[in-house]
Image: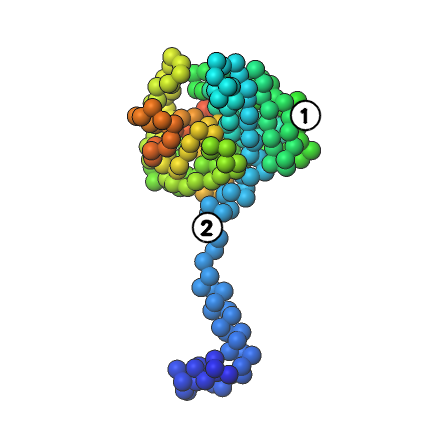
Amino acid sequence: MLGVVAYRALFPSAPSLSAEQVDEIAAERLAAATPPSAYSAQVYQVILPSLVLIQTQRQAPEPSERGRLGTGVVVNASADILTALHVVADATEIRVTFADGSHASAEVINRQPDIDIAVLHPLRPPDLIVPAVLGSSTGIRIGDEAYAVGNPLGLVASMSAGVISGLERSYNLADADGRLEGLIQFDAAVNPGNSGGPLLNRNGQVIGIVTALANPSDQDFFIGIGFAVPIGVAGGAAGAPDY
């Protein structure tokens, strides 16, 4: 009844409404005022079934250096996984975990050192294979939304959001001779463990593969600048079309 009294007080000449009608109007107004889900929530749900946790073992003098974490993304119906080459380059063992929780050993079936991209094939693919939707490398603009999803510091399936900060950037590889060219610069937070993961647009399409973070210090943490290989370049390693 309070709603009816308030309605009549505000609109004395309006037709008389029942309490049920006032409740219906209030519910409709409330629904119209409720904002839609954030793009980030939709993007996360789109990419999650295609996300892969990569764990590797390698020979190293220190035990703490023998294990490495990274991220990958399933890109075709064969369950091939696109990732960064430096995640698996010197691995003696590669183990992948899919979104459904299933595990498998994997082997490198393609290496592209000049763009820091590798393609893995699981020896036992999951029962349900959900390839990610690859976007376009052309048409990306500075200021566009950018979302990075991966496993930073072992925090599985984490998401960060930002914008495209620059295009056609270059980056000197820290642990190898070489220089990556034509990279996408973005400011969505990434840390060790994000490498090889997807960079996504607002439609949940993969527009890049995370390869590096800029850091002038000797500590591996994010300072606001990440880099990704455009999917138009990276996707070719897995036989995807170059958009």
Q: How is the image coloured?
A: rainbow
At x 54%, y 44%, the residue is: 45
Residue in front for this viewpoint, 214 or 32 = 214
Does the rendering let one see residue 142?
A: yes
* Quadrant in which residue 13 is drawn: bottom left
Extreme residue toward the right, this view:
127
Location of mark 2 (residue): 38
- Left or right of 99? Residue 134 is left
Dot 1, crowdedness within 10 Å: few (<14), some or many (≥20)? few
Dot 2: element: loop
Q: CA distance from mark 1 to mark 2?
A: 35 Å
Position above or below: 2 against 207:
below
Q: Position of residue 9 (x, y in %)?
A: 40, 85
Position above or below: 141 against 42:
above
What amino acid type is highlighted by mark number 2?
Ala
Q: Nearer the viewer, mark 1 or mark 2?
A: 1
At x 48%, y 22%, the residue is: 64
* Quadrant in which residue 122 is drawn: top right
Residue in front for this viewpoint, 28 or 121 = 121
What amino acid type is highlighted by mark number 1?
Arg
Q: Position of residue 159 (x, y in %)?
A: 47, 40
Residue in front for this viewpoint, 239 or 114 = 114
Disc with the residue nearer the chain's start (1 vs 2): 2
Dot 1: element: loop
Location of mark 1 (residue): 124
Residue in front for this viewpoint, 8 or 96 = 96
Q: Position of residue 177 (x, y in %)?
A: 38, 12
Q: Position of residue 173 (x, y in %)?
A: 38, 18
- Left or right of 66? Residue 177 is left
At x 45%, y 84%, the residue is: 5
Dot 2, crowdedness within 10 Å: few (<14), some or many (≥20)? few
At x 55%, y 22%, the residue is: 56
